[in-house]
Image (tube, rainbow, N blue to C red):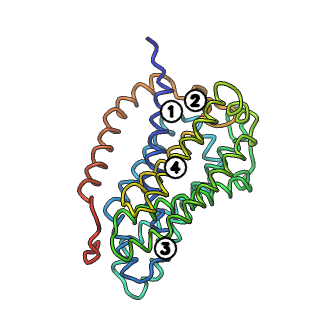
Amino acid sequence: MVIDYAFIWAGIIAFAVLVYVILDGFDLGVGILFPFGRSEQERDVMMNSVAPIWDGNETWLVLGGGGLFAVFPLAYAVVMPALYMPIILMLLALVFRGVAFEYRWRTKRWKPVWDFAFFGGSTMAAFMQGIALGALVQGIEVADRAYAGGWWDWLTPFSILTGLAVVIGYALLGATWLNMKLEGPVQAHMRSFASPLAIATLAAIGLVSILTPFQDPVYFHRWFNLPGSAFSVVMPVLLALTTYKLFTGLRDHHDIAPFMASLALFGISFIGIGISFYPHMVPPDMTIWQAAAPESSLKFTLVGAVVLVPLILGYTAYAYWVFRGKIDPEKGYH
């Protein structure tokens, strides 16, 4: 039996990126919605809802980026020069946002500054993640196993659209998370944002989905020729069922169902991107196997991943279990 280690590692990295998106997405979404808190107490409880778990969520970003560097070094060497600016801006935004969690509680005079850092860092990080995604979808120019494009190739109308789509989608995750974790007037206030954000998110998904096949002929062929055309039927059906669950959950004032449906929207969209990309690691030319490290390196690092990934999953699940339930607005994060 021949084991395809490159394919296994591509699956691990895709899984890490998906988990990062759905976990860090909602706490970035809380930051995006932060200015809409009607009082300082309301903003405090919004931040408290993610304070115990936000930094653990970003572990998956480190795993995805580190895994790409270790097992797909050629892809890393091509993608990084192409996306230096959005990645650096994203990391700086995450730093300011992380510092805001601590400093905001320890100052009166500068509290508005750290409030803005939390909002601005969250929004910028989400926007840059969407920009990077759009730049990857539209393709990266490669020549002689190196990036051959320009400094500003990442900044296009399509990448700006995907950046805005991610910001809106993360805000939806944040609204449904706050609906699940809070209670009383603040819960009702945050739930009131969820339906408009859901409509905007679905519109953004639809627009990006329509434009993606036209970014490269490979995408168009994959979606509109058998067997790929079957996904063109299945994916909209899954999206419609998830949308129904989301809006009925919001209508009936359910706590958990809207959040899970919002996560499912991201999961379905991620699968759609995977269908467009596969088997490329760097669209439109570099495949998983072309970008992979030598098989001996893949085997060696896989041993560590077999230990590390379940460990991260375990402590992540434990953290969410410990901090389950509603947030007490009288208790703060210190």
On the image, numbered disc 1 is attached to which residue? 10
Marks 1 and 2: in contact by CB < 8 Å?
Answer: yes
Disc sitting over residue 117 in the figure: 3
Counting residues from the start of the chain, the first of labels 4 and 1 encountered is: 1
In x, y percent, where is residue 263?
Answer: 46, 51
Taking depth in this image into account, of 171 and 86 the one nearest to the observer is 171
Instruction: Tell me if mark 1 has few (under 14), some (14-19) or many (20+) residues whose alpha carbon lies within 10 angstroms of its own.
Output: many
Report the residue marked by disc 4.
265
Residue 309 got which mark? Answer: none
Amino acid type, label 4: Leu
Q: How far apart are marks 1 and 3 (CA)?
A: 34 Å
The residue sitting at 44% across, 35% down in the picture is: 12
Q: Earlier in the sequence, mark 2 or mark 4?
A: 4
Mark nearer the viewer, 4 or 3: 4
Name the outermost residue toward the top.
Answer: 1
CA gap, disc 2 and disc 3: 38 Å
Where does label 2 land, which residue? 288
Going by the numbered disc 3, the residue's amino acid type is Ala
Position of the C terminus, as image quadrant, is bottom left
Kindly indicate whether the residue at mark 4 contacts the one at mark 2 (C-beta within 8 angstroms): no
Quarter in which the N terminus is drawn: top left
